[in-house]
Structure formats: structure tokens, C-alpha cells
Image (tube, rainbow, N blue to C red):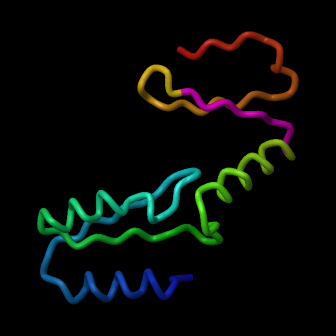
């Protein structure tokens, strides 16, 4: 289902003669996560769209809580590491807790 916000963006893009860039967010993010990039792309001459996913939560914090609850319900725990400059999400089953895991 297309939301009113998304339809408004589509209508604006269709009425424009500018090239269009579509920003798609990933896990734990929302369409608003692209706001700064959308401004930058708009300043560079592009029209932008940032659609959401069905049932997107209102805030990023709500998205994180929902994902963590789903993982824990499935018997998984997660760790998010950014020490090497690139984020990694590691999913670990209950059986693997206590084993030392080293990311490549």
C-alpha cells in the first residue's frame, strides 16, 4: 500500500523533468534516514523518493526494539560492531553463546 506521503513524492517526481533517485532504507532505519542525502541530491539536480516498508514503525528506536524482540523470540541474540569502520551485524544462536566468535 502506498502512503499519502509516498504518493505525494511520486506525484512530484512524475511532474518534474529532473532525473529521479530512489533511496531505500534497510534494517533499523526509516525513510527519514535519507533526509540529508535527499537534500544533497536535490541540490545536485535530482528529484528524490524515499519509500517506506509496510508497517514501518514511527521511530528508529521502535524499529530496533521490534527486531530485537523478533530475534529473541527465535532464540537468537545479536551483536553490532563498528570497530573496523564498517558495521557488521552478527546473529548468534543460544547454543553458540559462550563460544568465542571472530569475524573475518
Residue nearer the viewer, 62 or 78: 62
Name the quarter where the N terminus is drawn: bottom right
Q: What residue lies at 86% left-to-right and 46% top-to-bottom?
A: 73
Assign the magenta stretch its main secondary structure.
Answer: strand
Residue 43: x and y in percent read 15, 65
Q: What residue lies at 45% left-to-right and 71% top-to-bottom?
A: 51
Q: What residue lies at 58% left-to-right and 52% top-to-bottom?
A: 28
Position above or below: 1 against 66: below
Position above or below: 47 against 69: below
Position above or below: 57 against 86: below
Q: Is residue 32 magenta?
A: no
Residue nearer the viewer, 80 or 23: 80
Q: What residue lies at 25% left-to-right and 64% top-to-bottom?
A: 39
Residue 68: x and y in percent read 75, 46
User: In the image, which residues are magenta?
Assistant: 74-81
Q: Is residue 78 magenta?
A: yes
Amino acid at each position: 500500500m502506498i502512503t499519502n506521503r509516498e504518493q505525494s513524492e511520486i506525484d512530484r517526481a512524475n511532474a518534474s523533468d529532473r532525473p529521479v533517485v530512489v533511496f531505500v532504507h534497510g534494517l533499523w532505519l526509516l525513510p527519514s534516514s535519507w533526509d540529508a542525502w535527499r537534500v544533497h541530491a536535490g541540490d545536485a539536480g535530482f528529484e528524490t523518493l524515499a519509500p517506506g516498508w509496510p508497517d514501518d514503525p514511527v521511530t528508529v528506536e521502535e524499529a530496533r526494539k521490534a527486531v530485537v524482540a523478533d530475534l529473541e523470540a527465535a532464540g537468537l541474540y545479536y551483536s553490532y560492531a563498528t570497530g573496523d569502520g564498517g558495521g557488521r551485524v552478527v546473529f548468534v544462536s543460544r547454543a553458540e553463546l559462550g563460544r568465542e566468535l571472530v569475524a573475518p
